């Protein structure tokens, strides 16, 4: 029963037809479906669709947050079509468009827009794109406290079309224009017609966001208080705009993509995978990969320091990948736990010692399990004759076990402390990617392994 | 300006006071804040708060999705308080509560609930918890098409309090009760009072969800069409309930936590990090860590096969951690890209060869960059006398470079194909964790390295 966009082939066929056919084919579709169909077409196809369908529908399509290449579409459209279209967009989508436009187009189009739209755009563009101010739209319903419920209802029936949401009504002080309270449309409908809106929900404090609040924190407030929109309020108490729940969902999905990719150790790629150019993808990956590689060259230095130990007991080298990767894996687990706990505000900076006090014993316990597995593997292989680890194989098993306890414990502690360190230094804790943790832990893992081997095997093979 | 819960210490102090003091302290707080405060207290403290505050506020607090240990609270409350409280909860929170309750409590409480509540609960609990049916609530506003806009408005003012959302109105066929259309409250308010609701938005098809649809797909529909709620409709076209946007946000946040933790290579932990017991955390981690460890023991087997090569040229062992970790890092990048692309439906199973055709050249290009860095590192260190890699150091640099190209290309291809393979086998592609990929790539990395070394160094050090 869900409406779906026609397959790209069908749309391409339609584009060969005349504008009336295109309009007829789009008549049954929702704006989000038309936008999705346009994303699969060359930009010229999108332009044909926008100019063929009724203007009010074209506005709704370009207002869809999921529409891609909005800047290229606008550049291809005639100005006498593009300018009314831009003016009709909601403020948050205007901002997104102008952020994407080329410098020359931006300047030219800003000058032909009417003065109120231009000034508002300039204000909104002054906020960082990932802040509440950068996400907000300015079309909200503000009313004085003296209006009655009936007046508010009549007002909505007149101006409702132009507002992003009419489900939250902002009661503003008549003189200072400061936000007094938020009343829901449900409350307005349920109230007696002659009740002044200032009497609804008296004593209730509004939940608000600061314009510079990060979009993830905005999402957290909206989710915690089950809001449909949150007002963005400056230090003086004036409402600058509102962030609606649908913007927040889009922001959450982008944030999720960013976090997974960061944890995988790369720059964030927000465009669909198959649409990103080969060299763009290459550039996003090569930076971190090279940095991690240079970090990893320290393992060659560490190994070089133990070259004579290895030449005396080549058998020691056999367990190097096993031991250092165990440290990396336990570190990666701890990091993923802590990144999430920090993102959800379950853990704050001052909890670092409580985390350390859990991760150290947890790491030792986990290391002991792996140590038992590792030692058993060596002794069983020797018994069954799968491999000959020499006369000191029990001691070697002991050295491997001992270093596993040390390496896994170190991995858990380092992996859990890294997000704290990054946050303390002002970075996003999510930058602590799995490869980053593994690289950190590998060099130390080698030092722990060779120290344990020296301790256990001194006087025998070493 | 954002209301915040009092610090736990303050709440504990209040709990020593009498119920009136507790009620007075809670009077200024929003239900979500009281729920948050209760999460930080022992369960007995929560019980004291619930019984001290007005009953309608207690219902709102227990209805908060963020409230934890709801089952323990209900078990501690007297039945003559608990039963009306449960009856007053919204259907989706009743389901969550009954899913958490102990078997004995569940059976007992189900029997004392009134028949409509009991039957509805049984229906809702029959759907999987992470499906649309498991998320939905049944309090929605269904009206016949003949009602006028005025009748609908009057109806909302009478029954609005009991509905989860009144902002979407479901127009149901008078005879069959099938869903005809969804009309927004905005449209009802903007329509003339005498317009029949069946005439609003004629020809528009409703966007609906199937009861067994996964919550991530529900979130995607709500986000794509910017909805506040989506009706859950059975195959016969009857509305079973609705999923609201706030449930979807909560589902998205849980899904995000699960994905990051899976990618970190562990079972998912949904409770706050510091609240999870030590041994629970241990159990969630030790499983995957042991499986990965057993996979990694294959590296010891692979290394064992090359023991004589290592003893001839110990210098080869120095670059083992560097080379295998580079494969793991490039694999982890590719996996994180593909997991996300699959989660967002940007890439489907049949795209595997298009992905392969990108990842292979990308991997070769990335490998060549690392090869240049690695070879330069060896030759420079030799020139500056930091380390003596012997008379064949240029050949060794060549072998390291050649294997880096092979290992990084293999890592990119393996890392990008693994999510496809998992999905094909019916697993969640997000199970392809960074440590899982690294383990897969490490063994092959060793084979590639020693083959390249044999090719380049045969007749010299080997």
Image (cartoon, coloured by chain):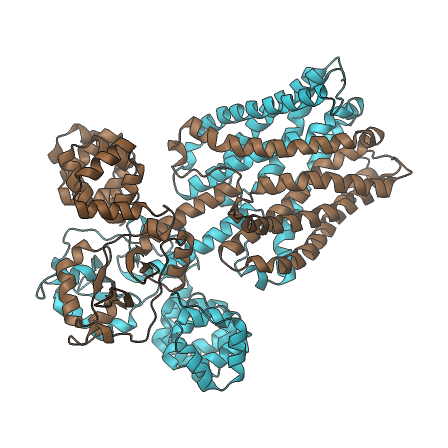
Chain colours: A brown, B cyan
Q: Which residue ends up furthest to the top in the rendered image?
A: B459
Q: Quadrant of residue A177?
A: bottom left
Front residue of this view, candidates A392 and A105: A105
Res. B418 visible in picture: no
Q: Residue at x 51, y 47 (%)?
A: A428
Examine the rendered structure and indicate whether residue B42 appears above or below residue A385. Answer: below
| B344 with respect to B139 (left or right) | right
Examine the rendered structure and indicate whether residue A59 appears above or below residue B106. Answer: above
Examine the rendered structure and indicate whether residue A295 appears above or below residue A250. Answer: above
Provide residue B255's location: percent of width, then percent of height.
46, 53
The mark total stands at 0
Q: Quadrant of the N terminus of chain B?
A: bottom left
Examine the rendered structure and indicate whether residue A335 appears above or below residue A347. Answer: above
Q: Which residue ends up furthest to the right in the rendered image?
A: A459
Front residue of this view, candidates B180 and B229: B229
Q: Quadrant of the C terminus of chain B?
A: top right
Provide residue B28's location: percent of width, then percent of height.
39, 76
Provide residue A203's location: percent of width, then percent of height.
32, 75
Res. A366 visible in picture: yes
| A75 with respect to A303 (left or right) | left
Front residue of this view, candidates B171 and B43: B43
Q: Residue at x 50, y 32 (%)?
A: A285
Provide residue A224's location: percent of width, then percent of height.
41, 63
Q: Residue at x 64, y 29 (%)?
A: B323
| B12 with respect to A407 (left or right) | left
């Amino acid at each position: 029963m869900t409406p779906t966009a026609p397959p790209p082939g069908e749309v391409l066929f339609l584009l060969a037809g005349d504008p009336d056919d295109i309009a007829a084919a789009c008549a049954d579709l929702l704006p989000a479906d038309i936008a999705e169909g346009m994303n699969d077409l060359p930009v010229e196809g999108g332009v044909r669709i926008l100019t063929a369908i009724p203007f009010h529908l074209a506005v709704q399509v370009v207002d869809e947050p999921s529409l891609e290449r909005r800047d290229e579409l606008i550049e291809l459209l005639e100005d006498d079509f593009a300018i009314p279209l831009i003016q009709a967009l909601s403020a948050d989508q205007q901002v997104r468009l102008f952020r994407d436009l080329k410098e020359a187009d931006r300047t030219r189009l800003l000058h032909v827009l009417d003065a109120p739209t231009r000034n508002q755009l300039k204000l909104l563009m002054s906020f960082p794109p990932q802040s509440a101010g950068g996400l907000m739209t300015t079309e909200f319903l503000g009313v004085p406290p003296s209006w009655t419920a009936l007046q508010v209802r009549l007002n909505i029936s007149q101006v409702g079309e132009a507002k992003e949401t009419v489900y939250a009504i902002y009661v503003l002080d008549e003189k200072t224009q400061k936000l007094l309270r938020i009343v829901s449309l449900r409350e307005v409908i349920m109230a007696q017609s002659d009740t002044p809106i200032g009497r609804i929900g008296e004593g209730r404090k509004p939940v608000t966001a600061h314009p510079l609040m990060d979009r993830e924190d905005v999402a957290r407030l909206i989710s915690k208080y089950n809001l449909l929109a949150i007002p963005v309020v400056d230090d003086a108490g004036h409402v600058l705009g509102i962030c609606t729940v649908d913007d927040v969902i889009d922001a959450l999905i982008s944030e999720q993509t960013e976090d997974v990719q960061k944890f995988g150790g790369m720059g964030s790629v927000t465009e669909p995978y198959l649409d990103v150019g080969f060299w763009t993808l290459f550039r996003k990956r090569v930076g971190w990969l090279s940095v991690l590689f240079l970090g990893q060259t320290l393992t060659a230095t560490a190994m070089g320091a133990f070259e004579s130990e290895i030449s005396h007991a080549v058998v020691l080298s056999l367990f190097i990948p096993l031991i250092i990767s165990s440290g990396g894996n336990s570190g990666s687990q701890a990091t993923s736990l802590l990144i999430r706990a920090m993102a959800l505000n379950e853990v704050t900076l001052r909890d670092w010692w409580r985390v350390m006090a859990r991760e150290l014993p947890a790491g030792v316990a986990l290391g002991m399990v792996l140590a038992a597995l590792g030692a058993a593997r060596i002794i069983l292989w020797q018994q069954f004759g799968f491999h000959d680890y020499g006369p000191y194989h029990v001691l070697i098993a002991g050295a491997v076990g001992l270093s596993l306890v040390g390496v896994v414990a170190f991995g858990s502690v380092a992996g859990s402390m890294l997000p704290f360190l990054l946050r303390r230094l002002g970075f996003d804790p999510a930058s602590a990617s799995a490869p980053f943790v593994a690289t950190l832990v590998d060099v130390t893992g080698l030092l722990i392994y060779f120290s344990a081997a020296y301790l256990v095997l001194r006087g025998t093979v070493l």
